[in-house]
Every structure is written in C-alpha cells, then in structure tokens.
Image (cartoon, rainbow, N blue to C red):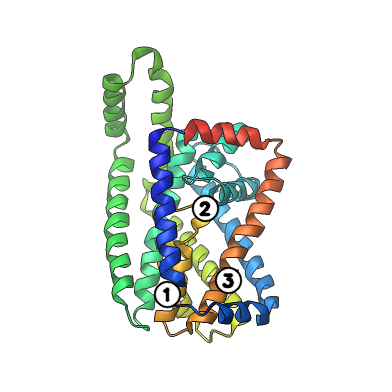
Amino acid sequence: MNRRRLALLVIGAAISLFFLWLAFRDLHLPEVWMGLRTARYVWVIPGVVVYFISVWFRSWRWHFLLRGSKRVSANRLFPIVVIGYMGNDLLPFRLGEVLRAYVLWRKEGIHIGTTLTTALLERLFDGLTLILFVLFGLLFVPLSVFLGRIVAVASAVFFGALMVFLFLAARPDLLRRLGRWGIGKLVPRHFRRPFWGFLEGIIIGLEGLRRAQDIAILFGVTVWVWLLETLKYWLVSFAFALDLGYIPMMVMGGAVNLLTALPSLPGYIGTFEMGIRILEGLGAPAAPAASYILVLHAILLIPVSLLGLFFLWLEGIRWAEVSAVAAERG
C-alpha cells in the first residue's frame, strides 16, 4: 500500500471513529440492547423489498446515462449495480465504483472512463436531491446548527460541481482540446493512447447532461429513487415505534447520506451512525433511535453484499481478480 492510500485509509478510519464516538457517547447501552431484542422485525421485510426496488430504478437511471455509449437494459445492469454496492461495503476508498466499471467493461465492453463519469453524475444528482429533501423537510421540522452546516457545505459543493459538469458537457470540443493538451504536456508519447481513450470515455459519459429534457428525466428518476429510500427508512422505523412521520425520515435520510460522502471505513461505518443524533434532534428518544439506526445500517449492508457476492460468482469473477483491480485502481 502506497503512502497516498495509507493516508486516505487513516483519514477515513479517524473520521469513522470520531463519528462513532459522537453517535454513541452518553447512550445507555442496555436500553439500546433492549430495543434490539424487542423490535418487531417483520417490518424489515417490506423495507428490504422497497430497497431492492429502488436499486432497480438506479439501474434504469444508469441505463439512461450509458445510452450514448451502448444501450444496456436495466435488468442487465441490475446485477452490476449490486456488485458495485457490495464493493463499496467491503472495499476501502469507494472501490465499488471501480469494480462495477470493470465488470461492465468485461461484460459489455463499455469504456471504464465512461462508466466512472456516469457514476460521478449519479452521485451528483443524488447529492442535489438529498439537499432538496433536507430543505423541504425543514419546512416542517426545526433545523439544528449541525444540519444547517451540512446543508450549507453540501449545497456549495454539489451545485458547484453541477455547474462545472454542465459547462463541460455543453462544450465537448473544448474539453477534448484541453484534455489532449494536458495529456500532451504530462504523459510520455508512448503512453498517450490509453489516456486519449479515457478522455473520449469521459466525453461520452457527459452526454446525459447536454439536453434539458435529459437532465429533467435524470432528476425525476433520482427523486423517485430517494422517495423509495425514504419509504424504506419509514417502514423500518415501525419496528422500533419511533413514531416519526415520513417527512422527518426524509430529513434524516438526506442528512445522513450527505454525511456518507465523507471519507470513512468501508460500508460508511460511523458516518451513517450519526443518524442517531439526527433522529434525536428530530424528537426521537436516543436509545430507540440507536437500535433503529444499527438495524437499518445492517439491512443496507448485509443483503446487498450477499447478493453482490452471488452475482460476482455468476459472472465468473474471483475475489483475487477483484483484489487485483482494487490494487491497480485504488
């Protein structure tokens, strides 16, 4: 492991441990355990079902973004999306995105540069939607100082990124000239061809931002995806009698998923657990909120990771091959 990767791993671990401490300090752990023991876990079943429905719609969104390179149905992309989620849960540095790019290239021949660009666009639309969810929810529930800072910083980052992507998508020739100039200056002649291919992959990946109609479709599908995600959060909350409505869950889900954009250990450990404090600020008792967040995090990690490993096996990809891709791209 080189110094850069080691530094990122240390930073992610430090952030995870800090947020775990912040989330669990002052909690009465016997009460948390009692909440886990007495929960009505039957509500987990519809939550998991809704979650995988939302993953299918994510697959459709990816199909829409990729259509400029190759038309691949959402049904064919669904296993690859699940494999990517499994990778993010089990590998450091969000290497699930690289893993699904590799699997898509291996299966469909789509350039990795295109796939990684569409993955960035997905995260961009996700972030913008989460900000809007939090802002909408805060019309009905109070805004804490902590949530206010999250929303302010995230708004600046995601809206700034959107402006950059829209500018580059509208000027592919300018992006091509700038990219080729940079490659010519920084990359030795014998190694330039693959970088040129990667640049063209990025340009193709940005095609989904060149028409207002396409942007509206992407945003609409993303809003639907996160409405389903919020429904999952709400359904699982019934298992712990939190007695919070759909809109407070919208605020919690938006805020906690914005936090998961920070560097952390695999599976968003620590950043996701800050949902305990967010729920507490929305009026939920601390111990039941902790029991709920622990179970919610588990059902977000375990089913998709197991299914991702199964799909990886069906694709004939061994874990050693995954490790090699991670080592090369991490």
> How far from the left and from the top, in percent, is residue 287?
52, 80
Q: Nearer the viewer, residue 265 or 203?
A: 265
Left or right: where does residue 76 sit relative to residue 167? right
Viewer-proximal residue among 154 and 194: 154
The residue lying toward the viewer, choosing from 150 and 2, is 2
**Residue drawn at x 66%, y 77% as measured from the top left:** 43
Check disc 2 and report the residue beneath it. Answer: 61
Image: 249 above or below 154: below
Q: Residue at x 52, y 63 (%)?
A: 225
Q: Position of residue 169 (x, y in %)?
A: 33, 42
Q: Amino acid at mark 2?
A: Arg
Where is 95 relative to 183, above or below? below
Residue kind at label 1, given as amino acid type: Arg
The residue under label 1 is 277
Query: In the rendered picture of this protein, how many numbered marks are placed on residues?
Result: 3
| Amino acid at the residue labelled 3 | Lys
Q: CA distance from mark 1 to mark 3?
A: 19 Å
Contact between marks 1 and 3 (CB within 8 A): the answer is no
Where residue 35 sits, quadrant-wise, is bottom right
- The mark that comes first in sequence, 3 or 2, is 2
Residue 139 is situated, as x and y percent measured from the top left of the image, at: 34, 81
